[in-house]
């Protein structure tokens, strides 16, 4: 699938391979050994135990990702699922189920689909894992995270996510991989992971299509 990108456009996307931080997927300049974590992950552990990203979120990957999110191109989810089947392989190998970061029903109605679900669904099929789209809900509408500080992002999503009582049995004791499109400060993923862990998940890891390079130096 070309996704409308030229050959030169593809070569400019910075795909992430090891070595990366095991906690947040930050690329390291050189190999520092297995399961090594960056300074921020060691100083302030997150609610999600591990994370991987397929590529950097920058001027070269942004347009393609936004086509899925806002450009009515849900079929791009299959492309990103293939990327993540490789980049997040260490997480998928240890997982029981995939859960997409949910949209509030008002935003879902306006957009017609959840971009995280469009990635998680084919990824679950490829990985032979359970797909649990209703296991996590966004109980209240939140403002866009764009343009907010780290603290503003945390406050914006505080208490926004929950596991419905009817879904708790599907989460309890399970090793969950949370799926989203982009990791910036990690505030949304942190709030989702806390809700899943409070519902009894054995562990929560994070798989995203792209992450910003600066996230590891910005307090979440």
Image: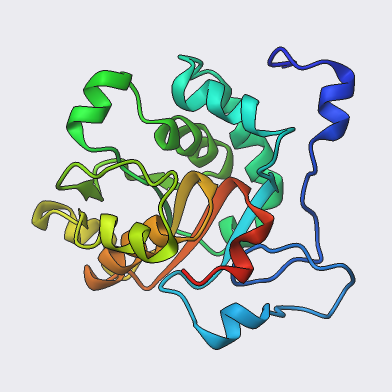
Q: Quadrant of residue 85?
A: top right
Residue 21 position in % (x across, y down): 69, 70
For residue 14, above or below residue 52: above
Residue 175 position in % (x across, y down): 42, 65
Quarter containing the N terminus: top right
- Residue at (21% x, 47% y) in the render: 137
Tell which residue pokes out farthest to the bottom in this image.
43
- Residue at (45% x, 14% y) in the render: 72
> Relative to 150, is 159 on the left or the right?
left
Residue 213 position in % (x across, y down): 69, 57
Residue 54 position in % (x across, y down): 68, 46
For residue 173, above or below residue 135: below
Tell which residue pokes out farthest to the left in this image.
165
Residue 189 appears anywhere in the view: yes
**Total numbered badges shown on the rendered structure:** 0
> Relative to 22, is 92 on the left or the right?
left
Q: Nearer the viewer, residue 125 or 57?
A: 57
Q: Quadrant of residue 171?
A: bottom left
Q: Nearer the viewer, residue 151 or 87?
A: 151
> Relative to 175, is 17 on the left or the right?
right
- Residue at (43% x, 59% y) in the render: 149
Residue 88 appears anywhere in the view: no
């Amino acid at each position: 699938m070309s996704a409308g990108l030229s050959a030169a456009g593809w070569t400019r996307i910075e795909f992430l391979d090891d070595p990366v931080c095991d906690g947040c997927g930050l690329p390291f300049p050189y190999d520092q050994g297995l399961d090594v974590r960056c300074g921020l992950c060691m100083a302030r552990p997150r609610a999600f135990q591990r994370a991987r990203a397929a590529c950097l979120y920058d001027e070269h990957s942004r347009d393609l990702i936004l086509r899925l999110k806002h450009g009515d191109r849900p079929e791009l989810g299959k492309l990103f699922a293939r990327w993540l089947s490789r980049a997040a392989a260490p997480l998928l190998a240890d997982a029981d189920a995939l859960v997409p970061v949910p949209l509030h029903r008002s935003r879902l109605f306006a957009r017609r689909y959840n971009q995280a679900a469009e990635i998680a669904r084919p990824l679950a099929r490829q990985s032979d894992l359970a797909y649990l789209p209703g296991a996590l809900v966004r109980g209240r509408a939140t403002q866009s995270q764009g343009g907010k500080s780290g603290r503003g992002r945390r406050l914006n999503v505080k208490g926004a996510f929950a596991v419905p009582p009817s879904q708790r049995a599907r989460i309890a004791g399970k090793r969950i991989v949370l799926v989203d499109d982009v990791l910036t400060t990690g505030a949304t993923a942190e709030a989702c992971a806390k809700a899943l862990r409070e519902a009894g998940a054995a562990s929560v890891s994070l798989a995203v299509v792209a992450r910003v390079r600066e996230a590891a130096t910005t307090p979440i």
